[in-house]
Image: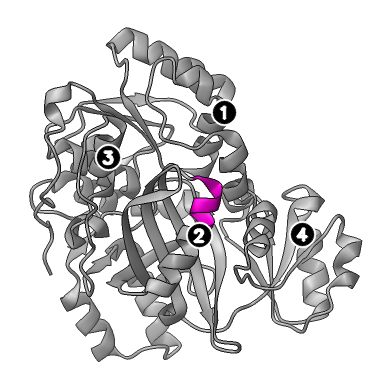
Amino acid sequence: MIHAAALPVGLPDLATSGVGALVLGGDHQGLGVVRSLGRRGVPVHVVDDEVAIARFSRWTTATHTCDLASAEVLVPFLLALGREHRLSGWVLYPTRDETVEVLARHRDELTSSFRVPTPAWPTARIALDKRLTYRTAQSLGIATPRTWYLSSPRDVELVDGEPPYAVKPAIKAEFVRVTRAKAWRADSRDELARLVACAAQVVPADEVMVQEVVPGDGQHQLSYCGLLRDGEPLASMLVRRLRQHPHEFGRATTYARTVDDPETAAVAEALLRHLRWSGLVEVEFKHDVRDGRTKLLDVNARTWGHHTLGQAAGVDFPSLLMADQLGLAFDRPTARTGVSWVRLVTDLPAVASGLRHRRWGPREVATSLREASVESVFVKDDPLPGLVELALVPYLAATRGW
């Protein structure tokens, strides 16, 4: 396994501008941003509201503590931080959905001090609310799983499909925080009614959705990863999400590999062109073997878990975003196919579960780990965050249900 990939070439010098980055969230996503920019000489501050491994990177210039989900707290904090540390013009990098919402809603206020590469609220809202995501996709002829939108638990009677069902929130941040799950599976009508009622106790009843479960494992899950400006792609990468944790409704990808899939890329880019999307984005799909259609699942308006795969494949997304924000020209990079990424701290539980349920065999797992080109946290030139994460596993298990 190669633990650190050489930086992709072809980018202009980012350090001479004097502009740095504020990374909002210091888990492995934020750590990947810190390393991408820090290796290119860009100063990086990390802001988080919990113990974060990015604080321990050799390339983190400074760290700060603030609630990342509260606009009333975060917006004035960032503006004061910018004044105190002279961070005018620095680029903001959100790593969580709730932070994306804060930046999108307060974009005009924040752009007085920072570069905010998050779409304005009318666009970001379409990504954050699956009801709007699916309705927009369907208006463009993009396939989605069959979905029932409920206004109260009594509306479960309107669900006319056959089990299994997925009970999930239209807006996921609060549901995931409380339940530590992305969705719940119901294998009968009685179980569906019970889970819908439970979900309505966590989020508003009109945010509870019921969706058909698209069959298939990670071989059928695809992600379009991109950097765009006004809907036009500047960089992109297609990834097959081979393993995730938990297995069926994964909160996080644990093993992924770059692939070539022009048809899926074209569908994602049609949606993003319609939205005139600017900034980073991940669009998740699943191929439905029943009808042969690849169906849209999610749009993530932020960095995604496996964005560091891009560096190994020749598409350094955080640095490309910085170059675009600075108005620096670069050629559109092409991601190499067959490059693999793993996050061992979550992949090992996924592997153990898969072996126990015979979803794959020991030889298949060993081959995949041997072929992995990059590990999300453990790298030779910045080892401390990986050691800290190992020490934090009990804390993460307790707070996130790892």
| Mark 1 residue crowding within 10 angstroms, few (<14) / some (14–19) / many (20+) | few
Q: Position of residue 371 (x, y in %)?
A: 17, 76
What's under tag 3, amino acid-wise? Ala
Residue occupying the point 47% across, 43% down: 96
CB contact under 8 Å: marks 3 and 2? no
Q: Secondary structure at mark 1?
A: loop
Depth-wise, is mark 4 or mark 1 nearer the camera?
Answer: 1
Disc with the residue nearer the chain's start (3 vs 4): 3
| Mark 2 residue crowding within 10 angstroms, few (<14) / some (14–19) / many (20+) | some
Residue picked out by circle 3: 54
Marker disc for residue 198: 4
Q: Secondary structure at mark 4?
A: helix
Q: Position of residue 68 (x, y in %)?
A: 48, 32
Question: Disc 3 versus disc 4: distance between alpha carbons?
Answer: 35 Å
Residue occupying the point 25% across, 60% down: 309
Viewer-side residue, 49 vs 397: 49
Residue picked out by circle 1: 70
Residue occupying the point 50% across, 30% down: 103
